[in-house]
Image (spheres, rainbow, N blue to C red):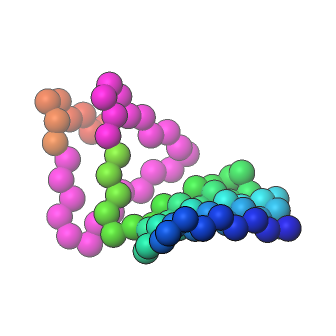
Amino acid sequence: GEAILRVGEMKLTLTSSGNGEALLEAGSASMRLKNGQSIELSATEISMKADTSLSLEAAQIEIKGSGTVDISGGIVNLN
């Protein structure tokens, strides 16, 4: 089954096929939750901010950019 909620330019689609999926679209930006296993974000610009700490943990992490990649901080540790 499928349920769709539209409010102005925003659209939320919930599907039950393939273990379920939720897709939130606002203009050209989107957030997709797939099968309880992955989250995909797509937008012209994505910002994250944490007041105290931000942690990333995975078996493999890849950071790449087609232009400049800046890393800054009071102390930056690499390996």
Q: Quadrant of residue 79?
A: top left
Residue 11 in the figure: left or right of residue 37: left
Vertical relation: 21 (above or below) 54: below
Residue 2 in the figure: left or right of residue 65: right
Locate residue 70, reporting x and y percent: 18, 53
Locate residue 59, reporting x and y percent: 55, 45
Residue 21 in the figure: left or right of residue 12: right
In magenta, the rendered stretch is: 49-71
Locate residue 28, reporting x and y percent: 43, 74
Residue located 72% across and 62% down the image: 14
Q: Residue furthest front?
A: 8
Q: Quadrant of residue 45?
A: bottom left
Vertical relation: 77 (above or below) 72: above
Q: Main secondary structure of the magenta part?
A: loop
Tell which of 62 and 56 is nearer to you: 56
Residue 18 can be seen in this image: no
Tell which of 20 and 77 is nearer to you: 20
Residue 78 can be seen in this image: yes
Residue 45 in the figure: left or right of residue 16: left
Asked if residue 2 lies in the magenta stretch, the reply is: no
Vertical relation: 44 (above or below) 48: below
Residue located 34% across and 46% down the image: 48
